[in-house]
Image (cartoon, rainbow, N blue to C red):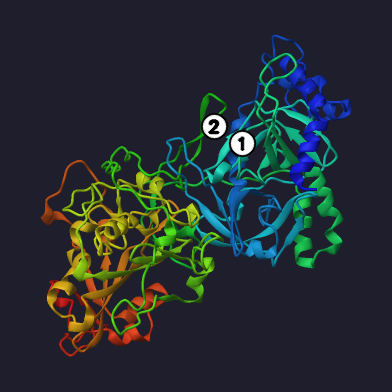
């Protein structure tokens, strides 16, 4: 029998008992709901004196609503142990919630992470939430490591997965910074009729919390039933008592068909079931002897904990470089001067009134929206253009074509072994999801899920049918600014930066195209319109300093220059291909919260010339711009910092990016042509368009 059917049967069987608990709570007699009075006494004996008062004037309302201020303080710390888990393995694509039960072990549902192969395709992201100002906080992502430890209980039993945390993918925090929610099988952690609290990622949203008016209505040997707000994506959430001790692993919730009780009063719409932590604890303890020695040691350590040890909160400032092998948290001690740092920020809870608690420094993550106002000192980002629409039938996109240039095959670049581990895999229903190739109209790209910026984009340009597209209307015409940016449902939203980042950091950055808006806009008008809209996906976006486009005319215009210079062979059909993307350097890159801002960008342009295939590599450096904040007072053009634009050997770009463009492209590089000046490392500063071509 399916788990859902079992759950419905349990809901039906316990209907009268749960109604009785609800009536007791409504009449302020919640302490009479627990049938085991010793359990009740044990729990109340551990709580504050407020919970023990019996006088009606001391406790008002339907529940015990008085809580010490530490309730908020501890909750603000313990929530860091809760993470957003995504599984992007072959044949499976889902998301849920989970939490650390030690610095080494992560707990979620088995129906979220089904087995060891699924765990290998999973990623856990911590601190995916907004701070009190609505700014995203810095996130840190980890792989899971089932080779170290992986213990599963099937969905129709205890529905849990305990898996070792793997290497860090992105961000600055370490597992010790998040604390953990220790497991316990003590009897004094809950009673029927009490309030419970859940921290969760419903619908894959940034972290949410449901507190106080959530009634625990029934207990079985293995499960708890409770009334609270959950949704898809809440699976694997920790269920807490008012002392922030985890009492259950949330795993199921369904709409409850009854809308009123016997007295005609409204009752909650949803009944939820959680697996009791004591049942999970006892099951893990019983299975210790069956585990490999390394996994057994990790589980034994987790079972021995009896209190949480949350760590400090992070900050959200544009940070200095974080050179390796030094730990990111210590990068500011290496002699690099950091920007001034705030010493306090705010953590927000809605319960349902809004309470703000100062707990540390603030920080940034992902909130999926398309427009938002700029920060206090930032220029407002342009509002969305209503007429720009993206065609959501992504199956009609051909993407980058390797044989686009007649008589030549120019393949997509291949990431090296280390970079390949960072490919943002697609959802399981997509073609070849592990390759991570997102196909758009006339261009393709591959995301770097650790950096949340594309590794590269690859674009075909047909100069013969090129059309200018109006940025405001999205139609063929001349341009004015006006931008709508889109999420791509084919890939996890946590694998790319979205509007929340660009709004938080609009003081410094614009949303910069990698594949330029004008490059793929060729062909029939309706095709060019679709290509234009496709360039406005956040997957094609990168943080570029707001002066970047004012300062990089050679890098921005090289494609047009090649088309217009008359260097294409007669049989080229005016076609060329372009690769571009970010260049990261741990030694010099600045950090915007948990986002490593690329100091440089590369571009490789390939075309068929009179003497055969030719290619040119360019690098532009925005580092000199990054100390300037946007202000409402414009600077004179001659005061813009000099941005160096270099002509660089394609081999050098490969070394700096970890991409392999293939021997065909390397052999076509014109950097070594006789007409070029001799330089020690074949890096030529571009001062005119004529410096670009041999």
The disc placed on residue 280 is none
Tag 2–tag 1 contact (CB < 8 Å): yes
Q: Residue at x 35, y 49 (%)?
A: 485
Q: Residue at x 84, y 63 (%)?
A: 290
Closer to viewer: mark 2 or mark 1: 2
Q: State left or right for residue 356 relative to residue 671.
A: right
Q: Looking at the picture, does residue 321 appear above or below residue 593?
A: below
Q: Of the two numbered discs 2 and 1 on the same chain, state the one appearing first in sequence.
A: 1
Q: Residue at x 67, y 28 (%)?
A: 214
Q: Quadrant of the C terminus?
A: bottom left
Q: CA distance from mark 2 to mark 1?
A: 9 Å
Q: Which residue is mark 2?
A: 349
Q: Looking at the picture, does residue 344 appear above or below residue 91?
A: above
Position in image of residue 133 (x %, y %): 42, 36
Q: Considering depth in this image, is 173 or 581 the residue closer to the camera? A: 581
Q: Can residue 132 be spotted in the picture?
A: yes
User: Residue lying furthest top in this view?
Assistant: 57
Number of residue marks: 2
Mark 1, residues whose alpha carbon is within 10 Å: few (<14), some, or many (≥20)? some
Residue 278, located in which quarter of the rendered image? top right
The disc placed on residue 75 is 1
Q: Looking at the picture, does residue 611 appear above or below residue 171?
A: below
Q: Residue at x 38, y 50 (%)?
A: 486
């Amino acid at each position: 029998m399916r788990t859902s059917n079992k759950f419905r049967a349990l809901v039906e069987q316990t209907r009268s008992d749960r109604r009785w608990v609800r009536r007791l709570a409504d009449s302020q007699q919640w302490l009479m709901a627990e049938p085991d009075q010793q359990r009740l006494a044990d729990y109340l004996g551990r709580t504050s004196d407020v919970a023990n008062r019996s006088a009606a004037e001391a406790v008002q309302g339907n529940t015990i609503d008085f809580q010490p201020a530490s309730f908020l303080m501890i909750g603000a710390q313990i929530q860091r142990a809760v993470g957003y888990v995504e599984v992007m393995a072959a044949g499976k694509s889902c998301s849920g919630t989970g939490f650390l039960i030690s610095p080494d072990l992560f707990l979620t549902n088995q129906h979220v992470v089904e087995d060891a192969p699924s765990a290998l395709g999973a990623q856990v992201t911590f601190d995916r939430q907004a701070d009190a100002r609505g700014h995203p906080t810095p996130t840190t992502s980890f792989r899971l490591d089932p080779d170290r430890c992986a213990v599963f209980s099937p969905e129709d039993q205890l529905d849990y997965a305990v898996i070792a945390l793997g290497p860090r993918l992105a961000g600055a925090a370490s597992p010790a910074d998040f604390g953990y929610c220790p497991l316990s099988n003590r009897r004094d952690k809950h009673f029927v009729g009490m309030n419970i609290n859940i921290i969760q990622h419903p619908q894959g949203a940034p972290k949410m919390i449901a507190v106080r008016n959530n009634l625990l209505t029934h207990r079985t040997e293995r499960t708890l039933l409770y009334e609270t707000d959950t949704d898809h994506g809440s699976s694997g959430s920790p269920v807490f008592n008012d002392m922030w001790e985890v009492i259950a692993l949330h795993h199921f919730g369904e709409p409850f068909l009854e809308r009123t009780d016997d007295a005609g009063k409204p009752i909650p719409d949803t009944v939820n079931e959680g697996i009791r932590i004591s049942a999970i604890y006892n099951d893990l303890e019983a299975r210790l002897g069956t585990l490999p020695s390394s996994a057994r040691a990790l589980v034994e350590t987790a079972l021995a904990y009896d209190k949480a040890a949350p760590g400090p909160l992070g900050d959200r400032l544009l940070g200095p470089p974080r050179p390796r092998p030094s730990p990111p948290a210590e990068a500011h001690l290496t002699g690099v001067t950091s920007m001034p740092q705030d010493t306090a920020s705010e953590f927000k809870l809605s319960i349902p009134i809004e309470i703000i608690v100062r707990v540390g420094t603030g920080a940034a993550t992902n909130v999926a929206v398309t427009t938002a106002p700029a920060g206090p000192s930032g220029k407002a980002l342009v509002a969305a253009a209503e007429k720009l629409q993206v065609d959501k039938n992504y199956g009609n996109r051909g993407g980058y074509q390797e044989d686009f240039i007649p008589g030549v095959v120019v393949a997509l670049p291949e990431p090296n072994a280390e970079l390949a581990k960072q490919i943002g895999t697609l959802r399981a229903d997509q073609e070849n999801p592990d390759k991570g190739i997102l196909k758009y109209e006339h261009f393709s790209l591959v995301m770097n899920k650790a950096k949340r910026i594309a590794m590269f984009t690859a674009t075909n340009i047909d100069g013969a049918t090129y059309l200018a597209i109006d940025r405001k209307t999205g139609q063929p015409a001349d341009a004015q600014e006006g931008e709508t940016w889109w999420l791509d449902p084919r890939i996890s939203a946590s694998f790319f930066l979205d509007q929340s980042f660009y709004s938080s950091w609009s003081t410094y950055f614009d949303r910069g195209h990698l594949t330029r808006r004008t490059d793929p806009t060729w062909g029939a008008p309706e095709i060019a319109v679709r290509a234009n809209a496709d360039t406005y996906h956040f997957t094609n976006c990168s943080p570029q300093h707001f002066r970047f486009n004012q300062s990089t005319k050679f890098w921005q215009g090289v494609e047009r220059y090649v088309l217009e210079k008359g260097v294409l062979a007669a049989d080229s059909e005016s076609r060329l291909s372009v690769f571009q993307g970010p260049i990261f350097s741990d030694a010099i890159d600045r950090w915007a919260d948990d986002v490593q801002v690329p100091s440089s960008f590369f571009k490789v342009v390939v075309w068929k010339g009179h003497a055969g295939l030719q290619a040119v590599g360019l690098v532009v450096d925005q580092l000199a711009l990054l100390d300037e904040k946007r202000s409402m007072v414009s600077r004179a053009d001659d005061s813009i910092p000099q941005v160096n634009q270099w002509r660089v050997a394609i081999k050098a770009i490969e070394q700096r990016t970890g991409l392999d463009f293939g021997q065909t492209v390397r052999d076509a590089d014109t950097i070594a042509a006789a007409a070029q000046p001799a330089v020690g490392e074949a890096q030529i500063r571009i001062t005119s368009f004529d410096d670009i071509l041999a």
